[in-house]
Image (cartoon, rainbow, N blue to C red):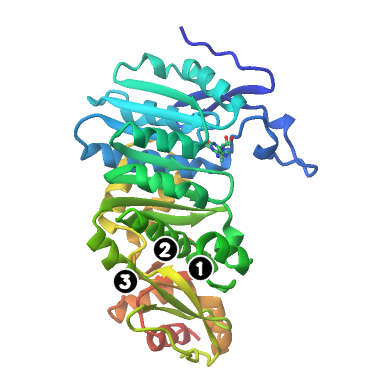
Amino acid sequence: MFDKTCPESFELHIEGLALFCAPKEELFKRPNGVYEPAYAPVFYNPAMIENRDITMAVLRNELTRHKGVFIFVDPMAATGVRSIRFALEVLAGVDKEVEIFMGDISDDAVKLIMHNIKVSNIDSLSNVNVHVNLMDANELLYYLRRQKLYIDYIDIDPFGSPAPFLHSALSTIRDGGVVGITATDTAVLEGKYPATLYRRYGVKGVKSIISKDIAIRALLAYTMKTASIFDNFVYPILSYYTKHYVRIFVKVRKSATKADEYLKKCLGTMMVCNRCGFNFLVSEETGARDVRCPICGGTMVSIKPLWICNLFDSEYVRKTYELAKEMPWLSRSSLNILNKLSDATPLGSTIRVTYIARVLNVKPPSIKRVIECIRNKGFKASESLLYPDALLTNATANDIVTCIKNFK
Ligand SMILES: C[S@@+](CC[C@H](N)C(=O)[O-])C[C@H]1O[C@@H](n2cnc3c(N)ncnc32)[C@H](O)[C@@H]1O
């Protein structure tokens, strides 16, 4: 029988196909009346729906190519909603044996997870084994590593920086497995606090006009560097920045030789102009040097080490988007993210048209017209998810200028 009651201060919520207990929002509000998930005894943030929706689509993609028992680890599970959704939206009706490990350091969270397993009825799925652990995430991941299990997917979703959990995740995941990582310390990753950025992620940088782009690259670079400690290398299959967080999904592979190659090829420097935001990436081999911005003559600052290879795998993203379209319960905003990424160039620079138009002293043209103009010149260009006035392109500075001036 379904148990559809909730403990005091909690109520039934629906997200995706999951029914579960989560905090009563009206009890945990900031003085301005807005629900604050961090005030609740167990964390649940409905604003993270795209994060969980896209995770479900990625997991569907992973399951299509997977053989044997699939092992999923959710070491910061809070209400358990992510694992419950995985069981109901990805596994139900699939002929696949799955082990789900949920954990949380909070006693209240673990009690709620146990309750939500009953509320959502996932314990009735015959192909799914669920384990719940009251443990620190690192403790759980190292425990699983000691069991020599082949972990296929690990979700790192802390409140703040994921850095303290990446050693355990990147050393525990199997060769070819995927780690999904969320970072909500975006002010740090964007360079607002340079000392913290360096201390936490080893990146030397400052805030800039395109700092959301830098935040994704800083997290990827740190993830690659951490993986390399274990003779592993990573590459992003999907990454984006939306709302208040950065989300990356990396595939982890074992090879010391390749790790050396990736460190050399994929970690480098971004040169960015602080007047107009024009930017370009420089590999370690080429080396960064002092230059003036080719568009406005402004000083270009260097930020490093950043991930300078593809930000996602276009084919993987397209397949994930196709699979997501077959899940009608996913939110429109999640599909929109996947749609935009499917269209985007994974190696483009983020260019903010209003800043460049300002230094050129012209009225900013519409993004769509600039994209069309750049494409007509034979370069790649697409809308950016990062800023409403931004596009992603591999065009040269000259061509960007011509296309922005074109519509005077
Ligand atoms: C942002 S919430 C996770 C939300 C959840 N993944 C979701 O999708 O709804 C972070 C959770 O991590 C837990 N947590 C914090 N530090 C932890 C640690 N060191 N080990 C395990 N869990 C931890 C918190 O109790 C909280 O429930």
The residue positioned 49% from the left and 89% from the top of the image is 293
| Dot 3 beta carbon under 8 Å from ligand 1 | no
Q: Secondary structure at mark 1?
A: loop
In the depicted structure, whether residue 238 falls above or below residue 94? below
Going from N to C along the chain, the mark reached first, 3 or 2, is: 2
In the rendered structure, which disc, 1 or 2, sits on the residue that comes first in sequence? 1
Report crowding for label 3: few under 14, some 14 to 19, many 20 or more residues within 10 A (C-alpha).
few
* Residue 100, quarter of picture: top left
**In the shown orientation, is residue 192 left or right of residue 365?**
right
Residue 356 pos. (x, y %): 52, 82
Measured as percent of width and height from the top left, residue 291 is found at: 47, 91
Res. 264 mark: 3
**What residue is at 25 percent from the left and 26 percent from the top?**
94
- Provide the residue designation for mark 2: 221
Nearer to the camera, 164 or 299: 164
Ligand 1 is found in which quarter of the picture? top right
Q: Neighbour class for label 2 at 10 Å: few (<14), some, many (≥20)?
A: many
Say which amino acid is labelled 2.
Answer: Ala
Q: Indicate the secondary structure of the residue bearing disc 3.
A: helix
> Is residue 59 depicted above or below 255 in this figure?
above
Dividing the picture into quarters, in which one does residue 284 lie?
bottom left
Counting residues from the start of the chain, the first of labels 1 and 3 encountered is 1
Q: Is residue 71 or residue 402 the one in the foreground?
A: 71
Q: For the point 30% across and 33% down, which residue is it? A: 149
Instruction: Decide: is 22 above or below 217.
Output: above
CA–CA distance in space, label 1 to label 2: 9 Å
Res. 322 in view: no
Dot 2 beta carbon under 8 Å from ligand 1:
no
Of the residues shown, which amino acid type is indicated by label 3? Lys
Task: Find the distance from the CA under tag 3 to the CA under tag 2.
Answer: 11 Å
- Label 1 belongs to which residue? 203
Report the residue at 44% width, 88% height from top: 289
